[in-house]
Amino acid sequence: MIGERMKIAIIGTGYVGLCTGTGFASKGHDVVCVDIDEVKVNKVNSGIPPIYETDLEDMLKDVISKNRLRATTNINSAIKECEVVFICVGTPSDDVGRIDLKYVRQSALDIGNALRECDYKVVVVKSTVTPETTENIVIPKIEEASGKKVGQDFGMCMTPEFLREGSALKDVLEPDRTVIGEYDQRSGDTIEPIFKELNAPILRTKIKVAELIKYANNAFLATKISYSNEIGNICKRLGVDVYDVLKGVGMDHRMSPYFFNAGAGWGGSCFPKDVAAIIEKAKELGYEPKMLQEVVDINKRQKVRMVEQLQKKMDIKNKKIAVLGLSFKANTDDIRDASSIDIIKKLLDSGAIVAAYDPQAMENMKHIFPGITYNENATETLRDADACLIVTEWEEFKNLKDENFNIMKNKLILEGRKVLDKKEIKDFDGICW
Ligand code: UDX
């Protein structure tokens, strides 16, 4: 470890909290993870992550064996014994797309109560919150509950997270950059050593700016994908491959070739929620963010475009359609806002018989579509199918060969993600737009 060893409390042992805490502990800090869920806390203390994430189990076991990390339900004592408190609780969407701050408010209240009997500490919001939340809600709540004053008795920062599912630990330990929004210099100076050793540029800025960076970042990435889908839809009408077109565009140094993959649209736990939240925040501020609304609408239409393409080629009523891939992206069992949900719904509404396979996500999908067939592998799913839709870019689908598809009744394959090798598979003309 390069910097000083710090005592860190992490409130919320979900995806962000556990990965961040484990990452910090691996750098030599003393981390205590707090959660209200006793089952979760017990699991973490036994070295079993309650969520699946690449390398997390090994790293968690390692830091626990070195006494660098432990979990507790006792928020009060965790806060009292640390120098920095990270708020990593969830901020789910409400009915109209605004973020629901109930867990953030509760954390602020708990922190405030604990701070009553404490010396100076810095509180850091890492949960994704819309601009002004930290200053208008979190700080007043902590001040009210603690009777103390920000900037004097405690410090305040906001550091957005940019973790991707599937590479979250790598993203904690090797970020492109760290953004520190700080109430004052002392707050920022206190937490900077934690991030300095990650060898990435650090941007120190105002709290409101840091909050907006997170949303502007995700909204831009979602926009980039919707843009590539729009170009893809034009390509389809021209009979050219959007991947060839965007390869050429991505070579311009003002662009970047990443996040240019056209296909069945974006989903997951962050993009839909974050774009909706920044749209609602903009409206609250009196601005109508038309481009972002269109980004969302393009995505909504894009998700079912595969089925529409299929319907142009055949009447799908009473036909067996094989759906390969259910998770919102590869290497996760997460189906939140996955394109497969809209696709299967449209298939069923059109009278098709759906057979599905996913290496990880079938159990989750059974709660949404209990009545469709789930197969143990891709080959079984393809047997006697009238068409196949590839919806998630799982590595194992890349290895599918011509003979795997030859068992279909009708070899019609549409790709929602670029997966198959055109040269390997006969009678297949690539991504469906
Ligand atoms: C995202 C952000 O990348 C991360 O920084 C943030 O903290 C959380 O949200 P994640 O939801 O894990 O991470 O997934 P990501 O890999 O970004 O993919 C999001 C969606 O976009 C997926 O549905 C994916 O299939 C889709 N996507 C991604 C595309 O359609 N094309 C692309 O080129 C890239």
Image (cartoon, grey):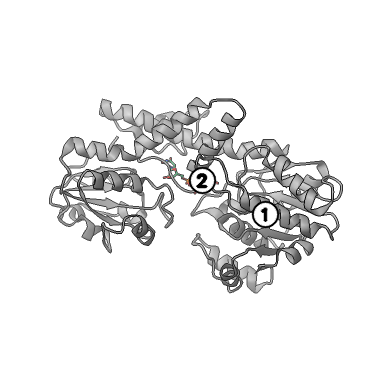
Taking 78 as reference, is 19 left or right?
left
List x then y, in percent, for residue 377: 27, 61
> Do we see residue 247 in this rendering?
no
Q: Which residue, as the protein is rendered here, is positioned at the far left?
A: 409
Residue assigned mark 1 = 106
- The dot on residue 328 is none
> Do we see residue 194 in this rendering?
yes
List x then y, in percent, for residue 34: 66, 63
Residue closest to the eye, 257 or 211: 211
Residue 373 sits in which quadrant?
bottom left
Taking 41 as reference, is 249 left or right?
left
**Quarter in which the C terminus is drawn:** top left
> Does label 2 or label 1 sit earlier along the sequence?
1
Q: Residue at x 74, y 64 (%)?
A: 76
Residue assigned mark 2 = 270
Spatial CA span between label 2 and label 1: 22 Å
List x then y, in percent, for residue 222: 48, 37
Q: Residue at x 21, y 60 (%)?
A: 380
Mark 2 beta carbon near ligand 1 (under 8 Å): yes
Residue closest to the eye, 81 or 396: 81
Taking 373 as reference, is 127 left or right?
right
Secondary structure under tag 2 reads loop
Secondary structure under tag 1 reads helix
- On screen, residue 296 above or below 19: above
**Quarter in which the N terminus is drawn:** bottom right
Taking 403 as reference, is 182 left or right?
right
